[in-house]
Amino acid sequence: MLFGKTIVVTGVASGIGRRTAEMAGQMGATVIGIDRSPPEQSIGQVLIGDLSTPKGVAAIADALPERFDGLCNVAGLSGQSGAAETLAVNFFGLRALTETLAPKIREGGSVVNVASIAGFGWRQNAARAAAIARTTGFPDAAQIVADHDIPNDAGYPVSKEILLVWTMLAAHQAHFKNRGIRVNAVSPGPVETPILQQFREVLGDARVNADVEAVGRAGTAEDIAPAILFLCSDAARWINGTNIATDGGLEAAVTASAYGF
Ligand SMILES: NC(=O)c1ccc[n+]([C@@H]2O[C@H](COP(=O)([O-])OP(=O)(O)OC[C@H]3O[C@@H](n4cnc5c(N)ncnc54)[C@H](O)[C@@H]3O)[C@@H](O)[C@H]2O)c1
């Protein structure tokens, strides 16, 4: 499905990013991984870099080759380190990397953002999400958090709400759209990776267990990677600006409950 393509994957040292990189290789792609920590197992070429600062993003972008086909934005923080750092990594760093790399992505290429069921509230919070998504460059995340009065425990859901809104806007931004580069999102529910324990600490076991029980089990990285890679492939050539809930049906249950049907 990805034969002959070069795919860049962030967050490859762990969880969903690692499985996405391994599976992309199995599907015939050349993979370039990015993470702030070195992966324990070899998954091919890896660049060590930090997405939380403009300098870190610029260094990663400079180190990548002049042409590649797909960018999978998987790296993310749980929110445990506070709202400013969480917004910096989960949104501002991701967006800065993607916009900086746009000229290197081949025509007809693909960007896939890993969001979350935690971003479900974007409709309710659309004005805030749109205001933050419309900022430019890599703003001071602490200032944005202060301006919008975002408490630390809301940093994670807010970061994913903004990411879902930006995914829709980005699909229509000239530097992607004019070159046929599609921008989509994948939203997992709870997935058995190291971050899940942090979600349990931030959200409480009861909330995480309720989400797991709603769909019978937690997801695995193996469940999420194929959806990301489908969106990278030419089979998804007419899918743009959308979000694929990859959660065993959790979003359907949350939507039914929220809208009372
Ligand atoms: N696991 C879940 O339950 C779940 C649910 C919904 C969404 N997600 C999303 O999936 C994505 C992947 O999460 P995961 O479950 O694989 O978690 P994980 O903690 O296993 O992996 C996250 C990776 O991102 C890397 N990373 C963090 N900050 C970075 C930075 N500043 N620069 C570069 N790399 C950085 C980490 O080193 C780590 O390797 C995240 O965006 C997360 O929000 C996960």
Image (spheres, grey):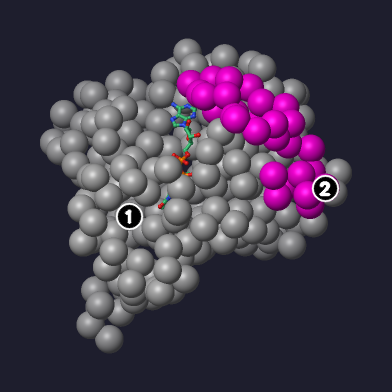
**Going by the image, does 15 lie left or right of 127?**
right
**Going by the image, does 145 lie left or right of 111?**
left
Closer to the chain start, of discs 2 and 1, is 2
Q: What stretch is highlighted in magenta?
A: 22-50
- Seen at 51% across and 23% down, the residue is 36
Instruction: Look at the numbered disc 1 and give the secondary structure of its residue.
Output: helix
- Seen at 74% across and 31% down, the residue is 44
Q: Residue 239, image x and y in percent?
A: 62, 61
Regarding ligand 1, which quadrant of the image does it lie in? top left
Ligand 1 contact, mark 1 (Cβ < 8 Å)? yes
Is residue 129 at least partly visible in the picture? no
Question: Counting other residues with Cα less than 10 Å from the Cα at mark 1, is it few (<14), some (14-19), or many (20 or more)?
Answer: some
Quarter of the rendering occupied by the N terminus: bottom right
Q: Residue 178, image x and y in percent?
A: 66, 43
Q: Quick check: is 30 in the magenta stretch?
A: yes
The residue labelled by disc 1 is 118
Is residue 23 at least partly visible in the picture? yes
Marker disc for residue 79 = none
Instruction: Look at the numbered disc 2 and give the secondary structure of its residue.
Output: loop
- Label 2 to label 1, Cα distance in Å? 32 Å
Q: Residue type at mark 1? A: Ala
Residue 158, image quadrant: top left
Q: Residue 115, image x and y in percent?
A: 43, 50
**Going by the image, does 67 lie left or right of 260?**
right
Q: Residue 97, image x and y in percent?
A: 53, 28
The residue labelled by disc 2 is 28
- Seen at 44% across and 18% down, the residue is 54
Question: Counting other residues with Cα less than 10 Å from the Cα at mark 2, is it few (<14), some (14-19), or many (20 or more)?
Answer: some
Q: Nearer the viewer, residue 31 or 179?
A: 31
Q: Nearer the viewer, residue 73 or 133?
A: 73
